[in-house]
Amino acid sequence: MSNLWARLARLRVDVSPLRDSRDFRLLFWAGTVFYLGGMVSYVALPYQLYQLTGSNFAVGALGIVELVPLVVFGLYGGALADHVDRRLMLVVTGAAQVLLTAALMANAFLSAPRLWVIYVLGAVLAAASSLQRPSREALLPRVVRHQLIPAAVALSSLGREISGLAGPALGGVLLQWVGVGWCFAIDVTGLTVATALFLALKPYPATDRSNPPSLSGVAEGLRYAMGRKDLLGTYVIDIVAMFMAMPIVLFPALATMVFHAPAMLGLLYSAEGVGALLATASSGWISHVHHHGRAIVIAASAWGASIALAGLMPSLWLVLVCLVAAGAADMLSGLFRSVIWNQTIPDSIRGRLAGIELLSYSVGPLGGQVRAGLVADRWSVRGSITSGGILCVVGVALTASWLHGFWAYDERTDEHAVRERKLRADNAG
């Protein structure tokens, strides 16, 4: 019995970073309320576009207009994160997002919302978010001790997934009873609170200001990432998985046209969050896994398989079960990717690499929205979902075969992990 309790204890999420670091607590709560509001808008925006146009492609086209700002400002935001005070970046870009989301809210409250306003503001919001995210991601290794990085990654993900679960459910209720405008109002509130918490952080100036933001600095970051198979594997596998199997853009059509249950739309958006939350809440075991590359490959394949099954299910409840499994697999993949990034990348280049991570997080899903919308309009909603899941499994397997060294990654012996571990220990001493 004692062995059973010991094993169960290993599953419990480690809350040591919350006790250990004031600034991590601020980042944790800022991230939680930030994502809560963001996930409410995440439900409202595609719903609004679908109601205005009736086109799956029009919903997916938002990803097209967001793509260039994400690429350009994500990379530049990473270069800025390595050169300026990261707290300042969080506050300034947070204030910009408050104003832009307030404009979306004002447009939604019009008797005839302007479609072009949604696309323009979506593109500018993508730019502001892309400028902010590298600084936010690059700050995590500086606010906790090195040995607490896996726990900090898991806790940060837990806060996001709680928001990812509550946000879509709240968004679905608001859409049903008070309309799209109030969804954006919740997002404005969350962004305002998060920005105030960012302001309460202590300053985090760059550790090395010798390389100002420039194309050559961005290129240096890209060369560093491309030169390491472990990092390259984390980026490529995530892009492949999300591009092939990102069904979220189809949820409005799946709920309304396939199952004739629009009131269930919020549950579709929440299901993956339920799986992600379960995976994160029981993530204490991840610190005992050392072959992170293998874990990422297995989890990404499980994501694709679960999405493929979701497209075949005869009832909406079975679809939700598959989406819960998919969300758990995606979260595990994300946790292990984040551990590799935060444990092995030097702080002097961490911002630029966070910009590249942003691309892997964003380009795949945005491209996947376009792919899913086009296939659904030309074939069927179910066909788009299932074919994407199958292509994901095949693509992940081919990527793992191509980057064979990624499968062999071991954080106990990897030269970059060993170097950063020793450097942090020396600095602490």
Image (cartoon, rainbow, N blue to C red):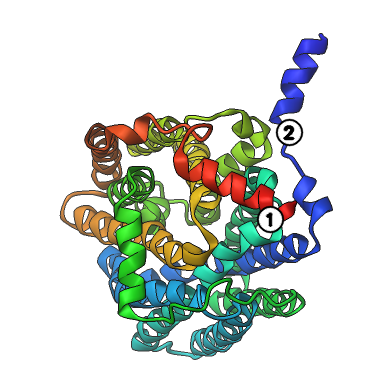
Q: For the residues carrying marks 2 and 1, which lies nearer the camera in this image?
A: 1
Residue type pointed to by label 2: Arg
Q: Is residue 383 visible?
A: yes
Q: Residue at x 42, y 68 (%)?
A: 46
x, y (%) of residue 425?
68, 48
Q: Quadrant of the N terminus?
A: top right
Query: Label 2: which residue?
Result: 12
x, y (%) of residue 68?
30, 75
Q: Residues within 10 Å of mark 1 (few under 14, many from 20)?
A: few
Query: Label 1: which residue?
Result: 427
| Secondary structure of the residue carrying numbered label 1 | helix
- Vertical relation: 31 (above or below) 303: below
Q: Residues within 10 Å of mark 2 (few under 14, many from 20)?
A: some
x, y (%) of residue 20?
81, 53
x, y (%) of residue 284?
68, 34
The label shown at residue 263 is none
Q: Of residues 245 and 379, which is closer to you in this image?
A: 245
Q: Is residue 268 visible?
A: no
**What is the quadrant of residue 306 in the picture?**
top left
Residue type pointed to by label 1: Asn
Q: Earlier in the sequence, mark 2 or mark 1?
A: 2
